[in-house]
Image (spheres, rainbow, N blue to C red):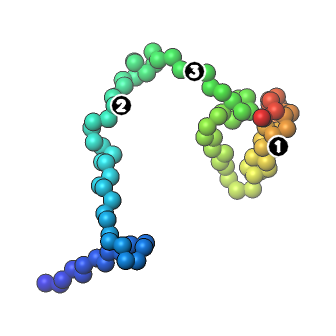
Amino acid sequence: MAQIPKARVTTSEPGKPFVPSPLPVAANDNNSKFAMIDAETLLGMKFAPIKYVIPGYVAEGLTLLGGRPKLGKSWLALDFGIVVASGGQSLGAECEHST
């Protein structure tokens, strides 16, 4: 039977003893403050309106810009950045000047 080699424990500071970090909390600890919500409850909830950086196209938060290569995604992103920074119009939508 082959022996399993012992792991070497090293620290970032020589001469100091190794102190193991506490174990991470399991992602499925089932003690979370979040409960399951059924679709009926979710449909009945009221949410704040979506805030758009570029009305109708780019919302606050995460927006993904995807497509085949060489379609102009980088140029569109550059246009969005310039329009948001300076104010103006992009894709027919009027954008406010960013502060």
Dot placed on the residue nearer the N-terminal end, 3 or 2: 2
Q: Quadrant of the C terminus?
A: top right
Q: Amino acid at mark 3?
A: Ala
Q: Quadrant of residue 51?
A: top right
Judge by depth and name the residue closer to the eye, 61 or 44.
61
- Residue at 28% across, 76% down: 7
User: Is residue 75 something one can see in this rendering?
Assistant: yes
Left or right: 96, with 8 as reference point: right
Q: Secondary structure at mark 3?
A: loop
Identify the residue under disc 3. 48
From what the image shows, is residue 17 above or below residue 78?
A: below
Identify the residue under disc 2. 34
Direction bottom: furthest residue: 2
Q: Amino acid at mark 2?
A: Phe
Q: Amino acid at mark 1?
A: Ile
User: Is residue 76 something one can see in this rendering?
Assistant: no
- Residue at 81% across, 40% down: 85
Query: In 3D space, how far apart are the residues under numbered discs 1 and 3 (Cα atoms)?
Result: 27 Å
Tag 3 near tag 2, CB within 8 Å: no
Judge by depth and name the residue closer to the eye, 55 or 18.
18
Q: Secondary structure at mark 2?
A: loop
Estimate how packed mark 3 is, as few (under 14), some (14 to 19) or many (20 or more) residues with alpha carbons within 10 Å.
few
Identify the residue under disc 1. 82
